[in-house]
Amino acid sequence: MALDRIAGEHSIAFIRSEQLFDLARSNSLFYLSYGIACCAIEGLMSAGGPRFDYDRFGIFHRGSPRQVDVMMVAGTVNKKMAPVLRRLYDQMPEPKWVIAMGACACTGGPFREYPNTVLGVDKIVPVDIFVPGCPPRPESMQFAFMELQRKIRDKTQERLDARASAR
């Protein structure tokens, strides 16, 4: 009797390497915090504490852009800091994702009227998840990471469905 009839086609015995890589990617996210305002202190620092414990989700902080998957932008980005943000994003290896955290990073926040404020990080780098709030709650940051993990898993299914329809 064939092994695929016993275990089923979608069992762990028949997992494709890209499915395994995406599973590992979604459950071991390394993030770079680009915190330049109060959101970084109030939102990121409390979210990384023992109460919310990102480690159990497989989410770890790294200090180098060359070793991260996710960039978290927290705070107001002005035009002087935009090239630095872009350079850090370009130094990240593929695949890479960006989370915009707080009203300032998403839309410019209360500093929209000033001419040196960038009206949203999505004008500089492509943003995958927007987290509203001023400052955003640690629970919303945790939810953003869970949504990013779901998004990575859904991308795997999209690729598998595209291959199946091409046959």
Image (cartoon, grey):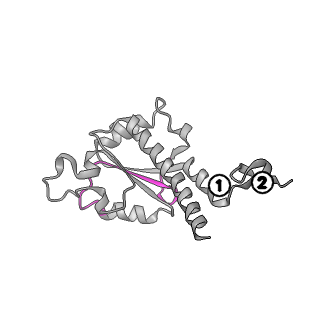
Q: Is residue 154 magenta?
A: no
Query: For the point 28% across and 51% down, which residue is it?
Result: 106
Nearest to the observer: residue 78 or residue 150: 150
The tally of labels here is 2
The residue carrying pointer 2 sits among few (fewer than 14), some (14 to 19) or many (20 or more) residues within 10 Å by Cα, namely few
Q: Amino acid at mark 2?
A: Asp
Residue located at (52% from left, 57% from top): 155
Q: Are marks 1 and 2 in contact (CB under 8 Å)?
A: no
Amino acid beneath label 1: Leu
Counting from the top left corner in percent of width and height, residue 157 is at 56, 56
Of residues 37 and 102, the one nearer the viewer is 102
Q: Which residue is mark 1?
A: 20
Name the side, left or right, on which 124 lies relative to 9.
left
The answer to whether residue 73 shows anywhere in this view is yes
Q: Which residues are magenta?
A: 61-82
Outermost residue, top side: 51
Read off the residue under disc 2. 4
Q: Residue at x 81, y 53 (%)?
A: 3
In which quadrant of the rendered image does the C terminus lie? bottom right
* Extreme-right residue of the structure: 1
Residue 72 - label: none
Which element type, helix, strand or loop, lies under badge 1?
helix
Q: Which residue is at the front of the view, 126 or 68?
A: 126
Q: Where does residue 58 sit, x and y in percent of width and height?
A: 56, 43
Q: Residue at x 80, y 48 (%)?
A: 6
Seen in the picture, residue 135 relative to 64 is either above or below; the reply is: above
